[in-house]
Image (cartoon, grey):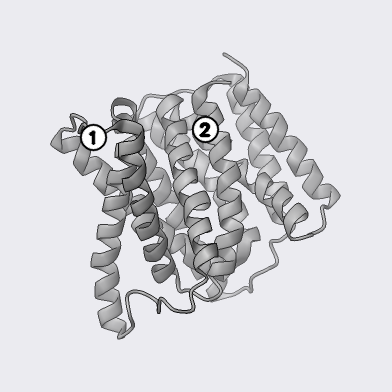
Amino acid sequence: MGLGELFSLLSAAVWAVGVILYRQLGASLPPLQLNLVKNLLVLGMVALAIPLLHGPTLPAFDAGSVAIALASGFVGIAVADTLYFRALNQLGAGRMGILGNVYSPAVILLSFLFLDERLTLLQFLGFGLVSLGVFLVAERRAGDAGGGPALLRGLAIGLAAILLMAVAIVMVKRTLESQPLLWVTGLRMLGAVGGLLLVGGLVARHRGTPLLPPLRGLAWRKLVLAAFVGQFLSMVFWLGGYKFTSASVAAILNESSSVFILLLAWAWLKEPLTRRAIAGVVCTLAGVGCMLIPA
């Protein structure tokens, strides 16, 4: 297993922990406020981690790389994560899990068009098995949201979020390959926080609502844990996967997060593990195995 593949699987595992925590936090915090608070926390974590791992020396960023990293953060975190949290609240985890299957095909298509990446036949088989496994896992909870116009609106918001995540990661792929990982992470977070302060400030003024939630009464322990595990660690591993392996392979391995969510829900929340879910786990693990076999 290469470093990129390892990072992609670790990202899926820690993101699964974050999803459970964010789902609980989303019951009391609106998507925009939740996204801004967790990104401010993550930006502080990245700012502390950069000198510890990279030292005080500034990397040789050119203006284009900086602009791309900032734009990737704005698109993939400020906009996409806010839409994702809103869709997660509206659709529930089951339908968002199914909708998440769009992510890896979108990354594969964009990587084919803009990065000249290709998959082997064995990797295509792995992609199919992972997609089937994730569908089996997610489908069991697909009834957790209502139908009608609200459902269609939620699906449209969720689809937009996932497509924007794919655009953002393909956009920054070449910069990741040539620049220090945490510096790129930090620039993406700056783009995200700056975008959220700008757009969120306009939205808050229009609605007459505060940009930040009341600091008292927040579940700070859960919020900090979710930011550290579900965002800081997950994003570093996620970007590391794209840095050290192809975008197509990393995207497919990231899909295994749905299986990790299922297993955590069974062990942590005592949710039942059905035969359909077990079949999904087996398919996903088989698909991951195909992705890890050297070409």
Q: What residue appears at the point 53 percent right and 34 percent down from the top-left corner?
A: 8
Q: Position of residue 195 (x, y in %)?
A: 26, 60
| Rendered position, 290 above or below 128 | above
Q: CA distance from mark 2 to mark 1?
A: 25 Å
Q: Earlier in the sequence, mark 2 or mark 1?
A: 2
Which image quarter: residue 193?
Answer: bottom left
Q: Is residue 171 visible?
A: no
Residue 147, visible in the rendered structure: yes
Give the side of residue 246 with respect to residue 272, left or right: left
- In the picture, the quarter occupied by the C terminus is top right
Of 232 and 113, the residue lying toward us: 232
Residue 74 vs 252, above or below: the answer is below
| Residue 253, horizontal then vertical, whole percent | 57, 35
Quadrant for the N terminus in the image:
top right
Across the whole image, how many numbered discs are drawn on residues?
2
Which mark lies nearer to you, 2 or 1?
A: 1
Q: Which residue is mark 1?
A: 56
Q: Is residue 277 above or below residue 91?
A: above
Estimate the x, y position of residue 30 in percent, counting from the top left: 45, 74
Disc 2 + disc 1, Cβ < 8 Å: no
Give left or right: position of 175 versus 26: left
Q: Mark 2: which amino acid?
A: Phe
Mark 1, secondary structure of its residue: loop
Dot label at residue 5: none
Where in the figure is residue 248, as x and y percent of width and height?
48, 31
What crowding class fits label 1: few (fewer than 14 Cα within 10 Å), some (14-19), or many (20 or more)? few
Front residue of this view, candidates 199 and 221? 221
Residue type beneath disc 1: Pro
Residue located farthest toward the top when viewing the structure as drawn: 295
For mark 2, give the secondary structure. Answer: helix
Q: Which residue is mark 2?
A: 7
